[in-house]
Amino acid sequence: DVKVTQSSRYLVKRTGEKVFLECVQDMDHENMFWYRQDPGLGLRLIYFSYDVKMKEKGDIPEGYSVSREKKERFSLILESASTNQTSMYLCASSLPLGQGNTEAFFGQGTRLTVV
Amino acid sequence: RKEVEQDPGPFNVPEGATVAFNCTYSNSASQSFFWYRQDCRKEPKLLMSVYSSGNEDGRFTAQLNRASQYISLLIRDSKLSDSATYLCVVNYNQGGKLIFGQGTELSVKP
């Protein structure tokens, strides 16, 4: 059974803290994604990685950075958490275009609250 | 303009109804298209891919119009269990960046 695992379901952090959200996939996928989901706004892409150490900004990268040191792990970093980063964060992985089934598999999400 | 746009709904329909969702995308370089389903408090899951010739999976039919940059999903004979948010997804360029629409909420009532 394919699996994308996010390290926490719920997190509460203080304003200004550095926050790490971890995501691990066991499908040997090249592509990994971080999204945030807010009511009425849908899933918005924060960062996308298409290989180890390779990354591309999504639609809303401000205030975030990412790290992909190993193929199976993609970390999202909030350098200095702010209350407007309170959201549901979803990690996903997929094969690249042209390599068969490019279905994206999601983790269960991390509900982050910044107080 | 958003890269992928959907009518957010909600669509409230009775059981047995036929309902159609539409989605437009702005980047003509888009290469792959999908519909995902998201249940309340759950992660999105693939419902079906969308092929140029159109495709059907049981009660679900997906169509793509590349000239108009438009994707549709038709659900026939709606069931209570179809209640969910339906997300239009477009896969771009090299590598395959996935861009989601904001989702269309469907509520099927008895």
Image (cartoon, grey):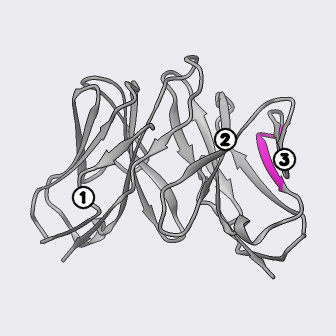
| Quadrant of the frame with the C terminus of chain A | bottom left
> On residue B34, which mark appears?
2
CA neighbours of label 2 inside 10 A, class few (<14), some (14 to 19), many (20+): many
Which residue position is annotated with label 3? B58
Secondary structure that dominates the magenta span: strand
Chain identity of mark 2: B
Q: Do the residues labelled 2 and 3 touch (CB within 8 Å)?
A: no
Q: Distance between the residues labelled 2 and 3?
A: 16 Å
Q: Are marks 3 and 1 in contact (CB under 8 Å)?
A: no
CA neighbours of label 1 inside 10 A, class few (<14), some (14 to 19), many (20+): some
> On residue B45, which mark appears?
none
Question: In the rendering, at what x and y percent does residue A39 appear?
Answer: 49, 71
Residue found at x 56% / y 29%: A102
Question: In the rendering, at what x and y percent does residue A69 appear?
Answer: 19, 27
Q: Which residue lies furthest to the top in this view?
A: A98
Disc 3 residue type?
Gly
Residue found at x 73% / y 51%: B23
Left or right, A22 with reference to B99: left
CA neighbours of label 3 inside 10 A, class few (<14), some (14 to 19), many (20+): few
* Depth order, front residue of A115/B61: B61
Question: In the rendering, at what x and y percent does residue A80 appear?
Answer: 14, 59
Q: Distance between the residues labelled 3 and 1?
A: 36 Å
Q: What stretch is highlighted in magenta?
A: B68-74
Chain identity of mark 1: A
Which residue position is annotated with label 1? A8
Residue found at x 39% / y 55%: A108
Question: In the rendering, at what x and y percent does residue B59 appear?
Answer: 85, 52
Disc 2 residue type?
Phe
Secondary element type, mark 2: strand
Please tell me whether residue A96 belongs to the stretch shown in magenta: no
Mark sitting earlier along the chain (2/3): 2
In the depicted structure, whether residue B92 falls above or below residue B108: above
